[in-house]
Structures are given as C-alpha cells and as structure tokens.
Image: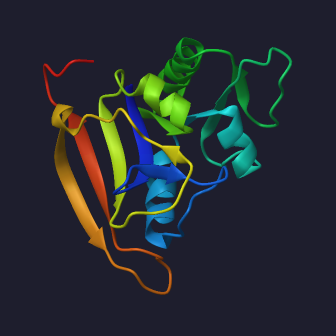
Amino acid sequence: MKLALICAMAENRVIGRKNSLPWHLSEDLKYFKRVTMGNSIIMGRKTWESIGKALSGRTNIVITKDPGYQAEEARVVHSIEEAIKVAESVSLIDGSEEAFIIGGAELYQAVLPLAERFHLTRVHANVAGDTYLVDFDESQWQEIVREEFYKGETNTYDFSICLLQRIEGATH
C-alpha cells in the first residue's frame, strides 16, 4: 500500500479558510472522488467535522487526541501510526493500493515526510485563507502527470491537477 497526500493549494500555499475550501473546483472534486474511491482516507477531526459525514465507498479513518471521540461510519484512531496500520489492514483485505491523507494542515505536515505520492491541485491564484501548507519542499518531488483546467461556470479559478512522485533518495 502506498501512502499518498491529496490536497488543493493556491500559489500562496493557502489550503483552507474557516475550516472550508476557499474555492469551488468541480473537476477537482470529481478527481478527488475518482482516485480515493475504494481506498482508505485518513483525516484529522476538524476535517471530518467540516465534511460532516463519512465519504461513501471509502474506509474513513479519523485521527483525534480525544479518547472518547466517536465518528459515525468511521474508524477513530489516536495517532498517525495507528491510522496507517488500519489502512494497511484494510488494504490486505480489499486490495486497495493507496491510503490518502485528505487533511487538515497539521496532518499534511506530519505525514509529508512519509508519503510516496502527492495528488496536488495547484490553484493558479493567490487566495485569502487561514490554513497553509508550509513545509512542502517541491525539490523532493517529480511531477509525472499534469492536467490543466480553466475558470468557468463550475470552477472559480484556473488550476492544474498534478500527480507527484517522491524522487528516489529524497529525504523522507
């Protein structure tokens, strides 16, 4: 099983505003659904609460420090290591190939050194926000696929969906 990040980021590294996405990118949402379907998705408690429900067709894993926390239709764990173990167990049973870190910022920062792949949507604008992806060192990643999308009725900004692979030998 590969560990992957999936995230949309503006040019100024904004990834969120007020516990929500600061854009609407219809094609990005379709991509997110397509690539995560049938796999485990790992998220922090705030991300879980902002989504408001389990995402169907995926194993939802929520990380929280609260020992009594419950999340309907999701597995609740208390560490990144525990979340990865759950995803690996699910992978052995159902054959899923990737486990996706879907947010938030603290979880991205913690898992960035462990990830092999990064499904990154690059929003081609500086966007107002309060949540950033700060420690992303692009020199450790090679872009292997890119698809361009343009602002229109269903997309509030121009953007690119990129698949990045960690460069072999890059510091984890």
Q: Is residue 39 left or right of residue 140?
A: right
- Give whichever of 66, 13 is nearer the camera: 13
Q: Position of residue 56 (x, y in %)?
A: 66, 49
Q: Is residue 117 left or right of residue 37?
A: left
Q: Write the residue at 80% across / 33% down.
A: 71
- Give whichever of 22, 66 is nearer the camera: 22
**Position above or below: 30 against 67:** below
Q: Quadrant of residue 74?
A: top right
**Position above or below: 128 against 79:** below
Q: Position of residue 45 (x, y in %)?
A: 70, 33
Q: Position of residue 128 (x, y in %)?
A: 51, 61
**Position above or below: 130 against 110:** below
Q: Is residue 51 left or right of residue 6?
A: right
Q: Write the residue at 22% across / 37% down.
A: 165
- Give whichever of 28, 39 is nearer the camera: 28
Q: Write the residue at 47% across / 36% down.
A: 100
